[in-house]
Image (spheres, grey):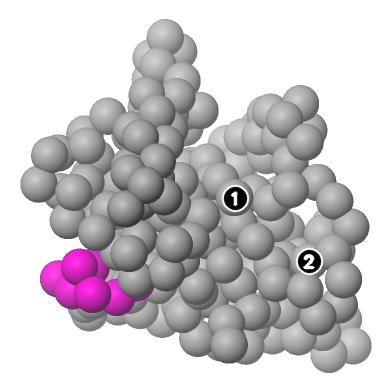
């Protein structure tokens, strides 16, 4: 049984971010409902905010972005619960220093958190599986180690896998706005409201099937 679940909405945004910038490392912030979670309860990722595709190493940019995201989330009864990261190179699925540094920072300020790494080599199989691995923090004295807990569960289970090919076939990923794009043109907003509506319609179709 998976210890982490990701909503169709969060997965669609994460996947769109990766597909839109196949030549670059990308990252983002994971959000969950702002409610107390039991020790054995699933960590349910309900949304995400795509961060960067070229400003990843810049700490000042991350600090500004986290402040904006915290305010955005709190106004919608959500809170930060983790971090996702896709490495630049297709064969590189390692949890590197940038990913662990940001994930550590989030874990230090959250009751429950996770790190999700994109398995680049599995992006060709999104019709049948999730190209993601989830990690949970294990505290050892003052140090955090990230332990794999396998693939996160996807909302709607295997029926939800179809949204991956849909995003690519219909080029839905092109509408994805991350923080880098927003900072280049502030008329573009990283809440990705248009993409939210596409996912909502897709989910309604699954519920009716």
Please state which of residues 123 and 60 is positioned toward the viewer in this rendering: 123
* Quadrant in which the N terminus is drawn: bottom right
What is the residue that sits farthest to the top in this orientation? 187
Q: Quadrant of residue 90?
A: bottom left
Horizontally, residue 114 falls left or right of residue 94, namely: right
Please tell me whether mark 1 or mark 2 is closer to you in this view.
1
Q: Is residue 104 above or below residue 193?
A: below
Labelled disc at residue 46:
1
Q: Position of residue 151 (x, y in %)?
A: 46, 80
Can residue 17 be seen at all in this image of the molecule? no
Inspect the magenta stretch and tell me whether residue 18 lies in it: no
Mark 1 is surrounded, within 10 Å at the Cα level, by few (under 14), some (14 to 19) or many (20 or more) other residues, namely many
Q: Which residues are magenta?
A: 124-130
Please state which of residues 5 and 54 is positioned toward the viewer in this rendering: 5
Horizontally, residue 77 falls left or right of residue 72, namely: right
Q: Position of residue 93 (x, y in %)?
A: 35, 79
Residue at mark 2: 112
Q: Is residue 106 above or below residue 176?
A: below
Q: Is residue 147 above or below residue 18?
A: below
Q: Earlier in the sequence, mark 1 or mark 2?
A: 1
Q: Quadrant of residue 54?
A: top left
Q: Position of residue 207 (x, y in %)?
A: 41, 50
Q: Secondary structure at mark 2?
A: loop
Labels 1 & 2 near each other (Cβ < 8 A): no
Residue pictured at 45% horizontal, 13% vertical: 186
Residue pictured at 22% horizontal, 37% vertical: 172
């Amino acid at each position: 049984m998976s210890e982490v679940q990701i909503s169709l909405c969060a997965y669609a945004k994460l996947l769109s971010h990766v597909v839109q910038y196949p030549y670059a490392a990308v990252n983002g912030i994971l959000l969950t409902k702002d409610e107390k979670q039991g020790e054995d309860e699933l960590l349910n990722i309900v949304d995400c905010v795509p961060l960067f595709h070229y400003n990843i190493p810049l700490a000042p940019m991350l600090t500004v972005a986290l402040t904006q995201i915290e305010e955005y989330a709190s106004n919608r009864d959500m809170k930060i619960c983790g971090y996702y990261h896709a490495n630049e190179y297709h064969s590189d699925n390692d949890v590197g220093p940038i990913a662990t540094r940001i994930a550590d920072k989030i874990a230090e300020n959250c009751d429950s958190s996770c790190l999700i790494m994109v398995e680049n080599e599995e992006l060709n199989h999104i019709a049948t599986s999730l190209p993601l691995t989830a990690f949970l923090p294990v505290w050892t004295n003052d140090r955090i180690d990230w332990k794999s807990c396998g693939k996160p569960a996807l909302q709607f289970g295997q029926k939800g896998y179809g949204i991956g090919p849909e995003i690519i076939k219909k080029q839905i990923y092109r509408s994805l706005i991350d923080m880098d794009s927003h900072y280049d043109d502030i008329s573009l907003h990283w809440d990705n409201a248009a993409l939210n509506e596409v996912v909502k319609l897709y989910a309604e179709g699954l519920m009716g099937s």
